[in-house]
Amino acid sequence: MSKRDYYQVLDVPRTASEADIKKAYRRLAMKYHPDRNPGDHEAEDKFKEAKEAYETLTDAQKRAAYDQFGHAGVDGMRGGGGPGFDPRDAFGDIFGDVFGDIFGGGRRGRSQVFRGADLRYELELDLEQAVFGDTASIEFATLSECEECSGSGAAAGSKPETCDTCRGAGQVRMQQGFFTVQQTCPRCHGRGQVVSQPCGKCRGQGRVRKQKTLSVKVPAGVDTGDRIRLSGEGEAGRNGGPNGDLYVEVRVREHPIFERDGAHLSCEVPVSFARAALGGTIEVPTLDGTATIKVPPETQSGRVFRLREKGIKPVRGGPMGDLFCRVVVETPVNLTREQKDLLQKFEESLQESGKHHHPREETWLDGVKRFFTSLGE
């Protein structure tokens, strides 16, 4: 009896992608699998036919030969479903192919390649380093490729061998009734290879723990929580896999003078009682030197002066921040008897004049009087 066209068997067009072919085969496998059709030889034949079509059309070389020569081009390339054919094993193949691609498995004979883990390092910086940028040296422990065995894990003169449990796939399949489940090979732990003569330095792991020192360029304007990514500076991969990355997380130390709020800075500026009352000029610190602030007469404690563009240039761009200086009127201490007498006379002169010399105090006292008056009503 002549064989049907494989594309017709799977009901897919000749331009179908491999994903479409897998999807079609899975549908037919679920429908005609012998476990779902016990004693139905016609269903088993259709299952075998679908498997044959699937194996041909998902193999690039076989598909090209089939498209050009038909069945004659592939009959000699396939072992077929003769003696030893087990439909359950065939059913497992489709789930191994479909779900293996999703969960990290693959076709038989393909060893597993693993990317190295990413690492995190917390870098503490002074405010000046964060604002103007710097180059910092960091040291951390990581898993690096073993130099003695070049990451193979095998001793000199030997090499890793294909795992005879999973046959190099890195995964094994377990039949559980109707379903076939794939899991990491317990012998090679997913590597697909085993080392019979392990390297003396890394003990067959292919990686060794070592201290690593790097120079990190800190861009100007970084702030607490910003991360600097160093590609490929994480842990070494396995089986030739790529290295992970190193993420340097910035934490800015507290500054004795300035507080930071994004691009802006703020600080407190102590001012003497006399200067706040009479007015004058004071020098205030900035991150790039000093600046002069003109304090008008009768300045009260808590007044804020704004110095434009004396803050920080954000690392991600944007306008320069400002510096906010908050005046704190300072009460003199350690007064001499003469100084105390002068202040007492000064206070008496204010009271005798009858003018409002303490507006904030008087406003506060008026508020207190109104509060207690309302309680008595």
Image (spheres, grey):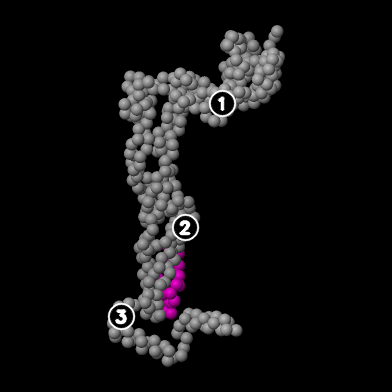
Q: Residues within 10 Å of mark 3 (few under 14, many from 20)?
A: few
Q: Is residue 294 magenta?
A: yes
Give percent across and percent down for residue 288.
Answer: 37, 60
Quickly name the residue at label 3. Answer: 335
Which of the two labelled residues, at mark 2 and mark 3, occupies the earlier sequence position? 2
Give the answer, above or below, for where 288 lies relative to 211: below
From the viewer's perspective, is the residue at label 1 or at label 3 nearer?
A: 1
The quadrant in which the N terminus is found is: top right
Between 309 and 150, the residue placed more toward the observer is 150
Say the numbered circle drawn on residue 262. 2
The residues bearing labels 1 and 2 have C-alpha atoms spaced at a distance of: 53 Å
Q: Residues within 10 Å of mark 1 (few under 14, many from 20)?
A: some
Quickly name the residue at label 1. Answer: 181
Residue type beneath disc 1? Val
Q: Residue at x 57, y 17 (%)?
A: 61
Give the answer, above or below, for where 126 lies relative to 84: below
Which of the two labelled residues, at mark 1 and mark 2, occupies the earlier sequence position? 1
The residues bearing labels 2 and 3 have C-alpha atoms spaced at a distance of: 42 Å
In terms of secondary structure, where does tag 3 sit?
loop
Which of the two labelled residues, at mark 1 and mark 3, occupies the earlier sequence position? 1
Q: Are marks 1 and 2 in contact (CB under 8 Å)?
A: no
Residue type beneath disc 3? Leu
Is 68 displayed left or right of 279 in the figure? right
Residue type beneath disc 2? Gly
Q: Are marks 2 and 3 in contact (CB under 8 Å)?
A: no
Q: Residues within 10 Å of mark 2 (few under 14, many from 20)?
A: some
- Which stretch appears magenta? 292-311
Between 306 and 28, the residue placed more toward the observer is 28
The residues bearing labels 1 and 3 have C-alpha atoms spaced at a distance of: 87 Å
